[in-house]
Image (spheres, rainbow, N blue to C red):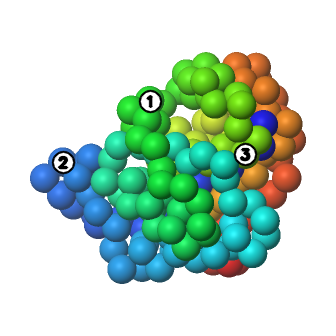
Amino acid sequence: MELLIIRHAAAEGFATDDASRVLTSKGRDQSCRVGEFLKLNDLVPDVTLTSPYARACKTAEVFCQSSGADKPVIEPWLGCGMRPEKAMSELTAYGDFGRVAICGHNPDFTYLCEWLLGSQAGGIHVRKASIIHFSNVRPPAQGGYMEMMVPVTAI
């Protein structure tokens, strides 16, 4: 499968709890640009999975809408604290999809990218609203080819 790892866009710094933090206007704009980039580059996902946290849900909802993708599916395992092995195990349920997008958090996505690449800790930093495209990912196994890493500032 192709795996698109998309970190949530810019969010408020404070809320009653971490899960309730919402996107800022900048974050909504970033999310829209992510979707436009996916559409322009023929990378629209077959299915989009998102963390249940408000900022990730809204990021996914907006980029799905602007790219023409189906509405995102909330997956609790994508919440803060996700481990790479857990993500890959859960992704086996989506093996029939050619291109899967996941929307969530750091440092979880940094760890996942490093794990997939067999990279040392600290070798990758996933910025807000970045798109990391891996091809040939075969859950639950480790490994894949990183096709590109695009920060929203380049979109």
- Position of 148 with respect to 151 (left or right) is right
Residue at 83% over, 43% down: 135
- Mark 3 Cα within 10 Å, few/some/many (few <14, many 20+)? many
C-alpha distance separating marks 2 and 1: 18 Å
Q: Secondary structure at mark 1?
A: helix
Q: Secondary structure at mark 2?
A: loop
Residue bearing the label numbered 2:
17
In the picture, the quarter occupied by the N terminus is top right
Compared with 18, 111 (above or below) is above
Residue bearing the label numbered 3:
99
Compared with 50, 142 (above or below) is above
Residue at 78% over, 27% down: 138
- Mark 2 Cα within 10 Å, few/some/many (few <14, many 20+)? few
C-alpha distance separating marks 3 and 2: 32 Å
Q: Position of residue 53 (x, y in %)?
A: 33, 47
Residue 3 visible in this rendered orientation of the protein: no
Residue bearing the label numbered 1:
77
